[in-house]
């Protein structure tokens, strides 16, 4: 289902955000060993957040079309209390004390974070063959790469694990995995989405956007 179809189903009470999140976690458990799309999955926080978003809808609080929708952040995006590795051993244990701007925006929109996706180390490459956390695999053919550097996000969406995930793009890192995995990726206008709290590759060229 598309994001808008899921949003309609949530408001019609044909499904709950908690049910969506449980299905997402089931799909991660089923597919991630094959795809290696995720570095970190925060089960308890994801289920608690989904329950909270259901409670808001039941009380007439509607934050918009992303309310209750599961998603993942590329693991360059700072997430308070959830480790942010940048795909590197150097930051394998780094846990930010604040959220990136893009994380704040999606939190305010009611989206439900499940975890952090694998990537080319520090976003510096287009294969998503990560020497520390393992190579991400293309869900259409696991012998092939998913593109990069946002390869985990592209693979997770293409596999139907999630309806969307965040990526970053300096020289193609949203557009390349979107192309390789057969999904849609958007590199927004420079500066439209704040860069604060996202590990940089090139300050004057970095973009944040959706896959």
Image: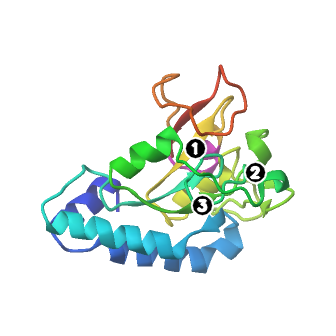
Q: Mark 3 or mark 1, which is nearer the start of the sequence?
A: 3
Total of numbered circles in the picture? Answer: 3
Query: Which region of the structure is painted magenta?
Result: 177-184
Q: Mark 1 or mark 2, which is nearer the start of the sequence?
A: 2
Contact? badges 2 and 1 (CB < 8 Å): no
Q: Main secondary structure of the magenta part?
A: helix
Residues packed near mark 3 inside 10 Å, few (<14), some (14 to 19) or many (20 plus): many
Element type at marker 1?
strand
Residue under the image location 54 percent in, 36 percent down: 208
- Relative placement, left or right, of 92 versus 9 is right
List the residue tagged with mark 1: 167
- Relative placement, left or right, of 118 versus 167 is right
Q: Nearer the viewer, residue 4 or 54?
A: 54
Closer to viewer: mark 3 or mark 2: 3
Q: Alpha carbon of mark 3 to alpha carbon of mark 2: how far?
A: 21 Å
List the residue tagged with mark 2: 128
Q: Mark 2 or mark 3, which is nearer the start of the sequence?
A: 3
- Relative placement, left or right, of 32 versus 143 is left
Closer to viewer: mark 1 or mark 3: 3
Would residue 36 be visible to someone looking at this image? yes
Q: Hey, which quadrant is residue 124 in on the image? A: top right
List the residue tagged with mark 3: 82
Contact? badges 1 and 3 (CB < 8 Å): no
Residues packed near mark 1 inside 10 Å, few (<14), some (14 to 19) or many (20 plus): many
Q: Position of residue 145 (x, y in %)?
A: 75, 54
Element type at marker 3?
loop
Q: Is residue 127 magenta?
A: no
């Amino acid at each position: 289902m598309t994001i808008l179809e899921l949003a309609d189903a949530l408001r019609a009470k044909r499904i709950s955000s908690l049910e969506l999140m449980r299905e997402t976690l089931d799909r991660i458990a089923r597919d991630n060993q094959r795809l290696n799309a995720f570095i970190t999955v925060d089960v308890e926080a994801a289920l608690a957040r989904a329950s909270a978003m259901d409670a808001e809808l039941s009380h007439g609080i509607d934050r918009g079309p992303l309310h209750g929708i599961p998603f993942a952040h590329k693991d360059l995006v700072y997430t308070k209390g959830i480790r942010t590795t940048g795909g590197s051993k150097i930051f394998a244990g780094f846990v930010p004390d604040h959220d990136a701007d893009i994380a704040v925006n999606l939190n305010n929109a009611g989206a439900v974070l499940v975890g952090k996706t694998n990537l080319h180390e520090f976003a510096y490459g287009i294969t998503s063959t990560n020497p520390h956390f393992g190579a991400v695999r293309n869900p259409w053919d696991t012998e092939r790469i998913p593109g990069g550097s946002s390869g985990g996000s592209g693979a997770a969406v293409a596999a139907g694990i999630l309806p969307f995930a965040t990526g970053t793009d300096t020289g193609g890192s949203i557009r390349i995995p979107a192309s390789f995995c057969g999904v849609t990726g958007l590199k927004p206008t420079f500066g439209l989405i704040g860069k604060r709290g996202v590990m940089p590759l090139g300050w004057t060229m970095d973009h944040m956007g959706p896959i």
